[in-house]
Amino acid sequence: MFPQLSRSARRTALLIALVSAVSLGVQVWHLMSVLERDLAATLLDMARYFTILTHVLVVVTFAIVSRPWRNGVSGPWLAALTLSMVMVGAVYHLLLSELVDFTGLGWWADQGLHTIGPLAVFLWWLFHAPKRRLVYADLPIFVMWPSVYAAYVLGRGAQDGVYPYPFIDLPVIGEAAAAVNLAALLLVFLLGGVAMIAIGRYADR
């Protein structure tokens, strides 16, 4: 468990939770306006995306971290969530940013979800989160959430035929290619966990 954090760390954590919450809210409103769907249909569609669900985890986790009393968040979980947010930003900017051209409030929501949020979470983790107790035995937690998401989105896609990302679009690329892509992504998460543990040990000295 985390030790007591400074007031500055707690306030910044609350700000990050608010940034994620506002970005999610603006994205919901934007998609409802553009796609002319109701709230329930919009939320159901958004719940397919790793970015959206990871930001929901950020809102909950960082709201807990911001409490003035002892925090019920483990160091390995926060490190793993930080890596997931880093991957949200990296995968989007490297592979997905050219697929959709957002304008107006949609652009601001997009920046909050894929640029500001991931950067803010990483910087908070780097400068505020206790990291010295991270060990390589913690590596499984770094692939836990991505694995849960992969099982969820593939199961949901099998029901309705909709896959949110091109690299797991089974009807287009086939099961073998999707499996290779997912295995590669999980390997990247695992290697990212190694890097996070190494960075954490060094940064806390």
Image (cartoon, rainbow, N blue to C red):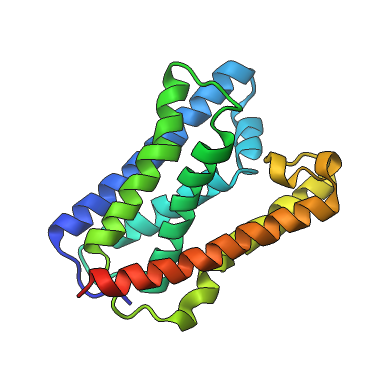
Left or right of residue 38: residue 134: left
- The percent coordinates of residue 167 (x first, y second) are 70, 44
Residue at the spot 27% in from the left edge and 72% down from the top edge: 202
**Outermost residue toward the left in this view:** 7
- The percent coordinates of residue 82 (x first, y second) are 41, 58
Residue at the spot 28% in from the left edge and 78% down from the top edge: 132
Image quarter where the N terminus lies is bottom left
- Residue 56 in sight from this viewpoint: no
Residue at the spot 77% in from the left edge and 51% down from the top edge: 178
Answer above or below: position of 29 versus 134: above
Total numbered labels: 0
Q: Nearer the viewer, residue 89 or 95?
A: 95
Answer above or below: position of 5 versus 13: below
- The percent coordinates of residue 69 (x first, y second) are 22, 68
Image quarter where the C terminus lies is bottom left
The image quarter in which residue 60 lies? bottom left
Q: Nearer the viewer, residue 136 or 1?
A: 136
- The percent coordinates of residue 95 (x first, y second) are 58, 38
Residue at the spot 77% in from the left edge and 39% down from the top edge: 162
Left or right of residue 143: residue 107: left
- Residue 141 in sight from this viewpoint: yes
Left or right of residue 7: residue 168: right
The image quarter in which residue 173 lies? top right
